[in-house]
Every structure is written in structure tokens, then in C-alpha cells.
Image: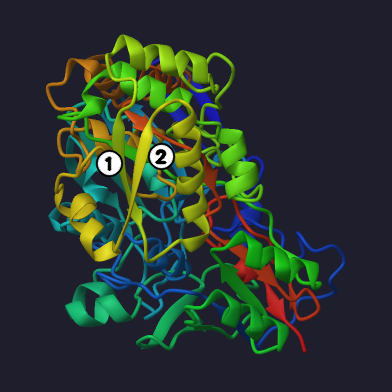
Amino acid sequence: MNEKSTPSRRVVLAGAALVGPFAALVGCGGQDPEAGGGDQGTPVDGGTLTYAVGTQPAAGGVDPMVATALAAQSVMNLAYETLLVRDDDGQIQPCLATEHEQVDDLTWRFTLREGVKFADGSPFTADDVVYTFQTYLQATTSKKAYLGGLDQIVAVDPQTVEFVFDAPNGTFLNAVAHRETFMIVGAAGYGAASEDDRQRLTYGTGAFQLTDWQDGVSLTFTANENYWGEGVPHLAGIQMPIITDESTRLATLQQGSAQAVAFTDGTVADQAAKSGFELGELNFTQSLPIFVNPESGPLADVRVRQALSLALDRQALIDVAMLGYGKLSLVTPAGDPAAPQPDGDTPNYTRDVAEAKALLAEAGQPNPTVVLSYFGDVSQAQHPIYELMQQQCAEAGITLDLQATPTSELAPIFTAGESFTDLVSLPWSYRADPTFYFDPFLSEAGAMNHWRENPDADTARDLLAQAKATVDEAVKADLVQQLVDEVAQQVLILVPMAVPQNYEVWDSAKFFGYTTDPYGSRSRLPQSWVQS
């Protein structure tokens, strides 16, 4: 929805022509209250949805400034909202900002929605946006990476705020349009809350607020009586029992104790669907990257890395190991609308055992042993991926030494940058900008970056820097395509596939007006309702 008046001035009326009026009606979800389920009748107000989940927020609780885990993100965005959002096609739409404008190469201006209040009744103004982003800048959070070069945040008037950078930032707009990145908090409510309360309760403008958290038992959300979306939410509240066992969660659905459930195992979700429950559309936004440490051992030689990649039959990994619940993917997961798709020209991507053997012979390592560590105590459904990879690699002469490792032992790798041997699999979720899938292993501060000063990564580092700096979408897309090809050529990381972050299943005879969204944000819960 970009209107260019001059090369240096880009005005974006954030979806106003198509969805602006409707978004004002139903909130940031921008979804027809009766969409996605056929003729479901008139929405019914009141009632509590029971939606069973497998995990609760961990470190940082539900404080947007510090919490980044998926279990936290998928509940925080019920309570907190962002300046902009993306629709199912990846197009930017309004949320707390109704318009945004690139004034010049260094300045973004946002016009804020009028009449919005926080859950405590305090008005939402430009001062809250300034407070929010200043707090992000002061917090210990990886989200600050999207604010590189931010020089000033200025409240021009109560409904206008400007962000001024000291260098072009090509990731900022995508970040403020991602529901799980820069959630807006209020200086009055959030600002006055204790650190403990911020981690266990919410203080946002969203349709539901977390009002009670029984550790290890349940999360309770209550409808925000001050919500700005006309006519929503329909639900009076949402109860989220925390049930770690997948089969037990399935039983709650079958017995009618819950109207909706989120699974992480596709086979259990498929079992629910076959017994008559509704399985939401799957979105393959969780990548399964395998990070490489080339500092020593066989993977220091690019030819061994290339042979390892060529030994993999990725489609077989999807069809056999994941029973079809996966999608071919490069570094940016296939479910991301900005993701380049693998094809026959993607370097070292199509299986070729003969070429793999030739490369190993050329490297003087016909039978290398490579260690692969992965989470042994979680994501059980993904373990067959590594076991089948082991078999495929053996056909090329590579011994893949699998190390099923407790999460507690792998955590220091992605939190503190602790080293690892050869390969480690650390799944990640959807990110706001395509360039940030590359940061963990290419940026200077990346926790899994073992490519520093390695010439094999020089071209990739340069392409990443260029892609981050450009605000031209077409130029950026081309740079990202070059980047994924270069990463695949040098095998700086291995990606077997992308999988759904979760599998949402519900009882369509009791729960209405709901559909999944591509980002796993459950953004359409405000438009849904329950009926006995």
C-alpha cells in the first residue's frame, strides 16, 4: 500500500483503502467476526473459552521488554498491541497507528488511533509510544537489534510520533508491524507496576488481559472493557489450562473440558481431526536450523559441509520423519510471506550422494564423523528427523553422531554464546524481518556465530549488511535471495525443513468465528465466541 510522491518520500495509508474502516470496527485482527467457519449464526457475547496449552511463559513471564519465548509471545499478543500489523498476505495494515509515513531516509512518522485506552482506563497517546521504545532501548532484550541507529523518538503532538535514525534502517518498519516485537505499554499502568507484576499480569490495549496466573496450572484472561474495537471481544474471558502431556490435552478436547487445544505434535492433532474436530490451517513458520561450528574438525572444510548438505533428502525427511508435517525451506521459514523458496538452482540442496562422496574424497575425508546435538527432552515429534538424517548421511560415508541433550545443557549456547561441537539444532520461530533469521550465525553479536573472521562467510556478511540498510522492498528481496543462495553455497547453516509452530484444534460445534493466522498469534480470538 505504498504511494510514492518522490524517491525520498513514501506515504503509506496503512491499508486504509481496503481494510482501514473495517479494522476500526473489529480491532487489529482485521478479521470478519463470522469469517472462517461458514454460516455460524450471530455472534454470542459472554461465555469463557477454555483453550488448553502445553507450556507456560518462562523467563521474563509476560513482560514484553524481556520475554521472547514462544509460550510468552503467543499470550502477550492477546493483551498488548503494536503500531502496525501484517495481514495473511504479509501486507502492512493499521493497528494502534492508522497511518505511517517515511518523511525522509532517516525519519518515520506515525499517526496514532484516537479514542484508544489502556485496560486501566488511561488514554493512549504519543507519550506512551515514546515511553515504550525508550524502555525497550534500556531493557536487556534482543529486540533492540531492530532499533539500530535510532537517535530520537519524538512526540510531535498527542496523536503523532516520529522516529529519527542516524542511518537508514531497513528492518524497523517490519519490526513495528510484527505483533510479537514492539508491543506498546503505558507509562501509567505498566510504568507504575512492579517487576514481578509486569511478569505475571498485563497492562496493554489488547482485547484480553492476563488477570491471574496459577503457576503450572492455568492462565486466566479477562475481556478488556476499555477495548477500542467496536463490538469485540465477544468472549468474557479465556481460560488456558497448562497441560504438558499431548495425549492429556487431546482428552480434554474429547471429553468437552476444553473447546480448543494447541498441540506441538502433528500426529496427535491429526488424531483429533480424524475424530471430528477442526484442525486450523497449518503455517510453516518454525524453522529447524542446524547451526555449524567450523572452527575445528571436519566442518572447517567447505567441501565436507557441502557433502553433508548434498547427502540429505529433505523431502524424505518431511514425508517419513515428520509424516508430511513439514515444508521445504531455506533459512527464512517457508511460512514467512517474505521467504525465498528453494528450487532446483539452490546450491547443495538437491540430494546427490555421488557428488557428496566426490567432495569428501577431494577433501581427503572420505568417512568423517560429525557430532549433532539436539534437544533430547522436548519436541519428541522432531527426533525422527535427526535419526533419518543419520541414515541418509551414512549412505554418503558420513557418520552423524547424534547427541540427545537436555535443554538445560543446550541453553547456554543460545543464551550466552557457549561453544558447541560441529552441529547443534536449535529451532526458532517467526521473526519480524527476514534478515534477522541470519543474525544468530552471521552478526557480530550472534550467539551461534562461529564464522567471525572466516572468509567463507565474507560475502554473506556483506549481503546481510546491505539488506538491513535498504528500505526498498524490491531491492531488499533481491538481496535476501542472494543471501540465502550464498549461505547454501557455503553451507553456513543447515535447514532440513520448516514446520508449524503449533497445531490448533477446536470443537466447531461449540467454538465459532475462529480461524488460525499465518503468524500463530491467535489474533482472531477477539472475533470468536462460544456457545453451549
Dot 2 crowding, Cα within 10 Å, few <14, some 14–19, many 20+: some
Q: Residue at x 76, y 71 (%)?
A: 277
| Residue to which mark 2 is pinned | 174
Count of labels shown? Answer: 2
Q: Is residue 134 left or right of residue 387?
A: left
Q: Secondary structure at mark 2?
A: helix
Cβ–Cβ under 8 Å for marks 1 and 2: yes
Quadrant where the image shows the C terminus: bottom right
Label 1 – label 2 distance at C-alpha? 9 Å
Question: Would residue 437 appear left or right of 99 to someone viewing this image?
Answer: left
Residue 506 at x, y percent in the picture: 70, 72
> How dense is the environment of label 1, judged by Cα within 10 Å: few (below 14), some, or many (20 and up)?
many
The amino acid on which the numbered mark 1 sits, given as a three-letter code, is: Tyr
Q: Secondary structure at mark 1?
A: helix
Q: Position of residue 279 (x, y in %)?
A: 71, 63
Report the quarter where the N terminus lies.
top right
Look at label 2 and name its amino acid: Asn
Q: Report the front residue among 311 and 364.
A: 364
Examine the image and state in which quarter residue 173 appears: top left
Residue 327 visible from this viewpoint: no
Residue ID for mark 1:
146
- The answer to whether one can see residue 64 in this image is yes
